[in-house]
Image (spheres, rainbow, N blue to C red):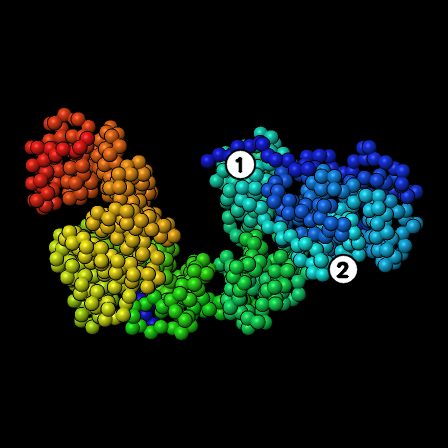
Amino acid sequence: MGAKKASGKRKSGGKKKHPGQGQRTGSSFAGASFKRSQVLGSGTQTTKINVQAYAAVPTALNSLPGLPQEFTGRDDEIAKILSILDPEGGSGAAVGSVAGLPGVGKTTLAHAVGHAALDKGWFTKVQMVNLRGYDPTPVLPEDALEALLRALGVAAEHIPPTLDEREGLYRSQLDALGREEDRVLILADNASTSEQIRPLLPARHHAVLVTARHTLPGLGARLFNLHPLQPDAAVDLLHQRLEVADPDDRRVEDEPAAADELAALCGYLPLALQIAAALLADDPDQPLSERVRMLTDAGTRLGGLNDGERNLSALFDECLTRLSHQEADLYRLLGLHPGPDISTPAVAALTGQPADKITPVLRQLVRARLLTQNSQARDRWSMHDLLRVHAQEQARTTMDRDRVPRRRYEQARVRLTDHYVRHAEAADTQFRPPGEAVSTLFAGREQALAWFDAERENLLAITHTYARTQTALDLGFSLGRYLEWRRRHQDHLTVRAHALEACQALGDVLNLAGAWSNLGTALNELKRHTEAHEAHLTAIDLFQQTDDTHGQADAWNNLGSVLSELKRHTEAHDAHQTALALFQQTDDTHGQARAWNNLGTALSELKRHTEAHDAHQTAIDLFQQTDDTHGQAIAWHNSGNTLRRLKRHTEAHDAYRTALDLYQKSGDTHGQAVAWNSLGTALNELKRHTEAHDAHQTAIDLYQQTDDTHGQARAWSGLGTALSELKRHTEAHDAHQTAIDLFQQTDDTHGQAIAWNNLGTDCRGLKRYAEAIAAGEKAVAMLAQEEDWTLTGEAWAEFATTLHASGADPSRVREAWEQSAAAYARAGDDEAAAASRANAESPPDTGA
């Protein structure tokens, strides 16, 4: 590795309706009684609430509006809130508070709860009051009480003037209703302070449901945090809203992928989805994909969520007016961070303030529902996607305003990127070869891994955001070993490509060769072997130009690995031999260990197994000298592979067991999976089939943990072989079919061929000869195409055995054995070729 040098379609219809959904809005007085009316006059109420007073107020006044037809996805939330409103829960007043960010649907949810509670017969009245807590002039509690008293039937002239008097009368009215077994649900919408709510709380019998953008402490309320919709519910809302506007609108069904992307771009926020749907309804010919393109640019996304009546950006702007200067400033500064979440230490770096000083401000933003604190990792914070876009816009606006804030924000950016680079470089030292300097910023590899895991997405975002800069170069070099360890191959390629591009843009000749070498390694991991080959050749040339012997050694070693993947084994051998000589020139014992290990693999592919075994043993000795446990594990595993090819199965088993122990000691889960799978193969060779079965099953589980599809395929293939030996042919058949499917996903023709061969054996064991013959034909054709003549010989032998067992024409059986002999001969295995020729003359009894 080059080190950086210092310098489908949706179905419509059938949606569950909620109580009140699709009904006429407004008050319904059908069947109401007017006997206890205390209102003597008539007219329209002028206070800031959604309630009207009439000449006679019915005893079952329901001021709830009907639910919009597209209301969806809130069944769980409704059930949770209803659980505290159930009259069986006690005689005390029930108080609930729903908090959530602007546009998340708090008010509509409160309406839905009111309808559901009425339908259950739990309340005889639902009274609503809009407290307008986020308006420039919020409703005062005495005005809210006046409106509620009028709605409860108190005549205007009987309403006292002071807050305390109104509060007392309000509670006495509710008590009187309670004695007559009338329960009232008060929906107090858009509260901003506890002072607005506290006078509205009844003493007993009744219930209050409050909605607010932030948590209101001191109410003694059950708290409900309302989150954005789930993806499916968000798409359903979009679909239902378009269907309301035009029952023939099929755009969601016609473009399901675009509908999913549009919902995501709206952050699954109901208000944003409603605005997007309104804009689409206004332009019925616009494809969803076009609307998606309009919203994809973060710089214009919020501008694209404005239908003339509802403006998401303006709503978010209004939220900032209620923040303190320090809170609003932090909100804007967070817009400079390109990643999905941020840690407290990173915020401290961004702001230039100590963590203990900035944490209370972060918590205030959480209380305002402009930020979310991670419930599992309490020092991590995140924004809703649309709020993050808004914060970014706010940061840009602030920077454009004046030279002073622009300089201040640029300094904040530098502090933030320096924080990430410094920590990434320190964490990377925990993955370097033994003997190199290790940073004390992290206590060990586990702590470094934990930091990298937590910050991976942020580090990738910063690398992308600061492409072609020193930051991208530094992170491109320091992230590579970690991403290799975690097998994040695509991410690895991305950061290596960014590092190379930054080197070229900055004219960094010193690190250019290392960047090419690292890119080649990343390409090789993704099986882009030809490109990897070219990258390593470029690296070698550049290292030679700068007389960097050690860099040349690394690049030659990497080139040899690529040549092995290209099945150019003689060239691979020579490349590793060159690397070994160069490492010896630089007295790099650890480099020599790596070169000997790779040289052993190349020798094994050249059928020089005894030399290969000696090379691996030399590698083991050198890795031991440098205290590299992980390197020893790799070398022991490769030694096991060579011993197995030498038919020394007991020694191979012991080598794999040693490798497994060392992988466990070094904490390499993927390495453990590889060792367990190889151990299963060795156990099978030793006829210990039950143990082999268990080993392969363990390998499957570990490969799944590390998201290695190809590894899973190989382990399923090994498991199938063990099951076949245990005469569990049906299970073996299923295991090999799974292996084939997984090999197809990873485009491994060779692996598929082996699995097809094994599947044919399973079918033969099940006496499903037609399937066995078809599988065998696939196997021999694919293996011959891959030019693996040893396995082609084995596959033809299995095919001949199947033909003989099925009662096929003897001439066809003889031809299959002759093909087996020819393939073995091409592989240089004269003994196996002679055995196949003998079988051609006298086929062995299959026992069928």
Is residue 290 depicted above or below 644 in this figure?
Answer: above
Task: Say which amino acid is labelled 2.
Answer: Glu
In this picture, residue 126 sits left or right of residue 678 = right
Name the quadrant containing residue 637: bottom left
Task: Say which amino acid is labelled 1.
Answer: Val
Checking the image for residue 252, the label placed there is: 1
**Residue 193: x and y, percent?**
73, 59
Badges 2 and 1: C-beta atoms under 8 Å apart?
no
In space, the residues marked 2 and 1 are separated at their CA atoms by 45 Å
Mark 1 residue crowding within 10 angstroms, few (<14) / some (14–19) / many (20+): many
Quadrant for the N terminus in the image: bottom left
User: What residue is at 84 percent from the left and 49 percent from the top?
Assistant: 175
Question: Disc 2 designates what residue?
Answer: 195
Q: Is residue 708 visible?
A: no
Q: Which SS class for mark 1?
A: helix
Exactly how many numbered labels are in the figure?
2
**Residue 381: x and y, percent?**
54, 61
